[in-house]
Amino acid sequence: MNATVPFIVTFLLAIVNATLMDNVVLIRFYGICSFVGVSNKVKPAFSMGVAVAFVTIFASLVCWPLYNFVLVPAGIPFMDTVVYILVIASLVQLVGLVIKKYSPALYKAFGIYLPLITTNCAVLGVAQGNTDSGLSFGLSMAQAIGTSAGFLIIIFLMACIRSRLDAMNVPKAFKGIPIALIVAGIMSIALIGLGGIGS
Amino acid sequence: MPQFVYLIIAIVVIVALVAIFVISFIAYRRTPVPKGCEDLVANKEKCEGCLMSECPLAHGREEGH
């Protein structure tokens, strides 16, 4: 990192990079399951994005100190995946508990895809990537915030597009998931185009 | 601080994480399912393209076919 660049600039650039140029769904292809599964209606898609964002940010907030202050000094950094999965699974259970108790409509909208946040590799990928690449706590939080924002924006946009596609005259063979994947491919190409900025 | 102290701290932390997971899991299971959500099933269109055999929903998918 260039010492003359203030940290806040690096922090904001890291967020923008993780949100757009290195988007978790369309560039890194993490979290495709919930992206395709819950993006057919706008409200559940937005709620799923918020739930994944909550779990990703809090998992990164907990996992980075656990790795650097507990696992590495104890000489057992290889236990990182086990610890991260425990943290993520506990967070998902807590989020699920709150939704189940206070928002039955959202619980029904998520359906069986709510527990699948645990197996959403976007969440584990961010926590694992932050520690593997040796990022500082600040930059790993920027990465988590950017990744969460990227997931939320893309799943929301996808839900908006799919709700419009339902009203379109799509050929029978392309109805549903096939046309959704074609749209995702076009969105991915658009984001790859942003990767050239600044080079 | 000696290495074994760090190791003990790490073991305590991991055991605490397991305990938190078990408590949250039991609390989640004991919370009653909201009305109308008792029969939630996997959506065939969403799941049939997925090849993940470890997914718990995969068993229902195999039976369906």
Image (cartoon, rainbow, N blue to C red):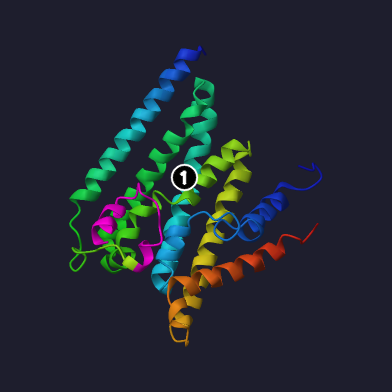
Q: Quadrant of residue A167 in the image?
A: bottom left
In this rendering, the answer to whether B8 lies above or below B42 is above
Question: Which quarter of the rendering shows the C terminus of chain A?
Answer: bottom right
Q: Residue at x 44, y 70 (%)?
A: A177
Residue type indicated by callout 1: Ala
Q: Is residue A29 left or right of residue A116?
A: right
Magenta segment boundaries in residue numbering: B45-65
In this rendering, the answer to whether A86 lies above or below B13 is below
- On the image, the x and y values in percent for residue A152 come to 51, 63
Q: Residue at x 22, y 44 (%)?
A: B26
Closest to the observer: B37 or A53? B37
Q: Residue at x 51, y 27 (%)?
A: A77
Q: Residue furthest top?
A: B2
Tell me the residue that label 1 is attached to.
A59
Q: Quadrant of residue B9 in the image?
A: top left
- Chain of the residue on which disc 1 is drawn: A
- On the image, the x and y values in percent for residue A95 come to 35, 53
Q: Residue at x 47, y 83 (%)?
A: A171
Q: Is residue B61 magenta?
A: yes
Closest to the observer: B43 or A91? B43
Q: Quadrant of residue A190 in the image?
A: bottom right
Q: Is residue A73 magenta?
A: no
Q: Tell how many labels.
A: 1
- On the image, the x and y values in percent for residue A82 come to 42, 34
- On the image, the x and y values in percent for residue B14 come to 38, 29
Q: Residue furthest front?
A: B65
Closest to the observer: A196 or B14? A196
Crowd band around label 1 with a 10 angstrom C-alpha radius: few (<14), some (14–19), many (20+): many
Question: Which quarter of the rendering shows the N terminus of chain A?
Answer: top right
Q: Secondary structure at mark 1?
A: helix
Q: Is residue A94 left or right of residue B28?
A: right
Closest to the observer: B21 or A78? A78
